[in-house]
Image (tube, rainbow, N blue to C red):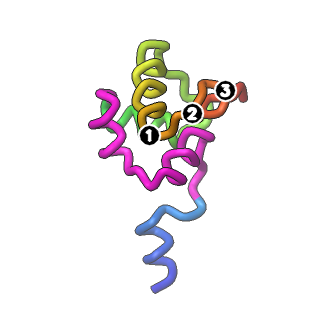
Amino acid sequence: MISEVIRMFGLGKYRTPFGKWLDDQKKTSVEFASESGVHRQTIDSMAGEKGYAPRQTTINKVLKAAKKVDPEATYEKLFPPM
């Protein structure tokens, strides 16, 4: 039963700082993709793939949507150098 709960919520998976921010905001990738105009798979990759490098235009869209949710959101906070 517990392993099913872990699988359902994805506990233990790698999260980028952007992914952790999404989790803190209680946003799903589907919701945020709709708000930002970026494809859900791209949001998933940005949130959970180590070393994923989206285009600058994608980052700009994500930051614009993130600032609407959290005015404290910055490039440095969501996408620090790895």
Residue at 50% in and 78% down? 3
Amino acid type at image mark 2: Ala
The stretch of residues the image draws in magenta is 13-38
Judging by the rendered image, the residue that carries numbered circle 2 is: 73
Judging by the rendered image, the residue that carries numbered circle 1 is: 69
**Magenta portion: prevailing SS class:** helix
User: What label does residue 77 carry, if any?
Assistant: none
- Whether residue 36 appears in magenta in the rendering, the answer is yes
Amino acid type at image mark 3: Glu
Judging by the rendered image, the residue that carries numbered circle 3 is: 76
**In this orientation, which residue lies closer to the viewer: 14 or 79?**
79
In the rendered image of this protein, does residue 10 appear above or below residue 59? below
Q: CA distance from mark 2 to mark 3?
A: 8 Å
Binning the other alpha carbons within 10 Å of mark 1 as few (below 14), some (14 to 19) or many (20 upward) gives: some
> Percent x, y for residue 20?
58, 48
Binning the other alpha carbons within 10 Å of mark 2 as few (below 14), some (14 to 19) or many (20 upward) gives: some
- Of label 1 and label 3, which has the lower sequence position? 1
On screen, residue 12 versus residue 69, left or right, reads right
Tag 1 secondary structure: helix
Residue at 60% in and 41% down? 16
Residue at 48% in and 21% down? 59
Instruction: List the single residue furthest toward the top.
Output: 56
